[in-house]
Image (cartoon, grey):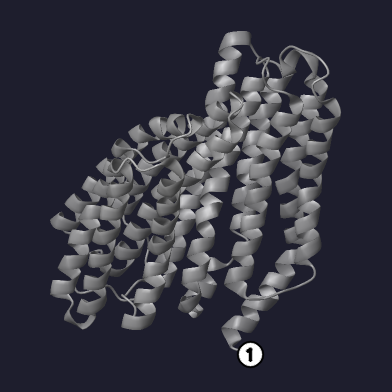
Amino acid sequence: MTGRDPRERGRSSSPLELLYDLTYVIAFGTAAHQLANQISEGRVTPAIGAYVFAIFAVSWAWLNFTWFASAYDNDDAVFRGATIVQMIGVIVLTFGLPLSFSNVAAGDSPNNLLLVVGYIVMRVPLVGLWLRAAREDPDRRRIALSYAVVIAILQIGWLVTAVAGAPVWPTIAALVVLAVAEMAAPVVLERRLGHVPWNAGHIAERFSLLTIITLGEVVAATTAAVAALTQAHGWSIAAVVIISAGLILAAGFWWTYFLIPSKTILEKWPERTFAWRYAHLPLFGAIAAVGAGLQVTATAVNDDNLSVAEVAAALAVPVAAVVLTIFVTWSVLMRSYDWSHVPLFVVSLVPLAAAVVVGMLVGDESSGPVGSTHLTALVAVIALVGLSPIFEVVGHELIGYRHTVRVVEREISGT
């Protein structure tokens, strides 16, 4: 474990990394499902808090493994075994998510012992791998040891918040401090002690693959929700529109995300990787939340407790978050500004605003399931939300892409 070549061209994800990523389909799907259930029951604010906590725990553990693997993956038996143990941790954490959401709904902390045990199982093997790297890569011993020590100390902090029994708000404050420390540590360590040999092109591919996996969760969640709806009540206009919207949203986000030339720019300017990778943390959460919004929509068809306005918000807010984070990711990576991107960004938000307005105009004037009282309004809301990524894709292909090409050419040429 002496370190990979950070300048290696054409490096791709290993089969082990792809296997590891599959566990995150379950984690993202469970978090989105719990979010949808809590929203359907009217507990919106607690649900969002628990969801943010869950997505951070899952995404950050994945990011840390990816960071290490990019630098030191030698694919031997020890590395494989440590990776499989981390996969077990993902599953344990997933079992703790329902309790986390129910605790927050009851006014307690989102952290619980089962969840934190899963998180620690995800992180402790990484401590051992960093210690191994420190022993076998003398040139980077200080930073490898520092990573191991920092991760170990932070895991103790997470465990204390789960078992200390402190009041809710001090516990939440401690969780925020720990999360900030987790994100700040890699930046501080690598600025002061030098970089470990991560590969920028490999990092770009790994993040793009997890984005695809998260988009797959949107399709899976939509399919499951519509399947349950049709099994109970048969096919309807609402069911067709919901499944169509799920596919359009997933395809539109995929298209838009891959208009960002991440690998090309990061291989040229690897120092931009830090800000670029942090922009993905809210992106992963926002994409998975779109799946939750579609589940809420399917539930609303036969649920007396949900209004068109609530459905519109459950769909429009996460879609707007995805559009915003893709825009931010592009800007962080390219370090460029162009007026053409601002109108494109605004135009993609227009149908989302229109969907919310439609929901507010309908209001709660009549009782009964949305699908039986306001079917037209529901279909209009779903269709408007589906237009957002279409506007974004068409706009970027016709206008924004040319600016992206100009920026890439300028960056590559060094002018």
Identify the image quadrant of residue 165.
top left
Rendering coords of residue 253 (x, y %): 62, 49
Residue pointed to by mark 1: 415
Farthest residue toward the right?
A: 361
Q: Is residue 186 visible?
A: yes
Q: Residue at x 63, y 9 (%)?
A: 233
Q: From this viewpoint, which residue is outermost toward the top? A: 233
- Closer to the camera in the image, 64 or 108: 108
Rendered view: 389 above or below 204: above
Residue at position x 81%, y 14% in the image: 366
Which quarter of the rendering shows the C terminus? Answer: bottom right
At label 1, counting other C-alpha atoms closer than 10 Å, the crowd grade (few under 14, some 14-19, many 20 or more) is few
**In x, y percent, where is residue 342?**
77, 64
Q: With 364 as the anchor, is 234 left or right in this view? A: left
Which quadrant of the rendered structure holds the N terminus? bottom left
The percent coordinates of residue 112 (x first, y second) are: 34, 38
Compared to residue 8, the image places residue 81 above or below, namely: above
| Residue found farthest to the front | 167
Residue 399 seen by the camera: no
Count numbered badges in the picture. Answer: 1
Amino acid at circle 1: Thr
Quarter of the figure with residue 279: bottom right
Q: Is residue 349 toward the left or the right of residue 260 in the image?
A: right
Between 351 and 151, the one nearer to me in the picture: 151
For numbered disc 1, what is the local secondary structure? loop
Say which residue appears at 18% left-offset and 73% top-offset: 134
The spot of residue 271 in percent (x, y) is: 47, 78
Q: Nearer the viewer, residue 147 or 297?
A: 147
